[in-house]
Image (spheres, rainbow, N blue to C red):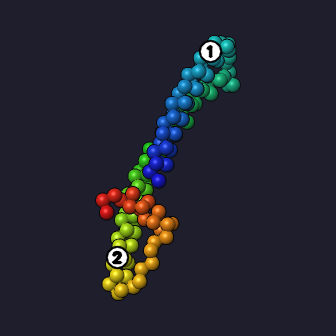
Amino acid sequence: MEVEVDKLELMFQKADSDLDCILYRLEYEIKNNHPDSAGENDPVTLLKELPVIKSQYQTLHTCFKPVAVEQKEMKGRISITLIKTMTMIQKLQKLIDLELSPLSEEEKTAKKQLKSHVPDL
């Protein structure tokens, strides 16, 4: 999950950089190709609104960061609880001499993935 969060953050950063580049290129093109443009349909005026959009984007990104941190913490807590529960069940099964069937390949894969999120257990 955190890989997706990191990818999303990189996408935000790239989009921010792309907006800066586009703004610069558009202003340059408009000034060179249409120096006499004026009025309410002035492209330069419209381009000036891009920083407002960029600011709103930065606000959204700032609001998103705490959610990502909390999501990572919750994932860790859930993984720890699940591993402890699985261990407890296995111990109880051994205590009551319950015949344990071997884990299926799917269960083995799930167990490895779970332990990879909480390597200290």
Element type where label 1 sits in the image: helix
Task: Give the crowd class for mark 2: few <14, some 14-19, many >=20 residues within 10 Å.
Answer: few
Placement of the C terminus among the 4 image quadrants? bottom left
Whole-percent x and y of residue 30?
64, 18
Q: Nearer the viewer, residue 76 or 66?
A: 76
Of the two numbered discs 1 and 2 on the same chain, state the one appearing first in sequence: 1
Foreground label between 1 and 2: 2
Say which amino acid is labelled 1: Lys
Question: From the viewer's perspective, is residue 34 above or below residue 103?
Answer: above
**Is 34 situated left or right of 117 in this image?**
right
Disc 2, SS: helix
* Residue 32 picture quarter: top right
Q: In this view, does 83 lie above or below 65?
A: below
Q: Which mark is residue 88?
A: 2
Q: Name the residue located 38 percent from the left edge and 78 percent from the top edge.
A: 89
Picture residue at 40% right of the left edge, 52% below the top: 69
Task: Single out the residue that lies furthest toward the left.
Answer: 120
Please name the residue that numbered disc 1 is placed on.
31
What x and y, as percent, mark residue 52? 53, 34
Identified by mark 2, the residue type is Met
On the question of residue 79 being in view, the answer is: yes
Q: What residue is at 40 percent from the left and 65 percent from the top?
A: 78
Q: Work out whether residue 80 or residue 27 is closer to the camera in this orientation and state it.
A: 80
77 over 27 or under it: above or below: below
> Which quadrant of the view contains residue 28?
top right
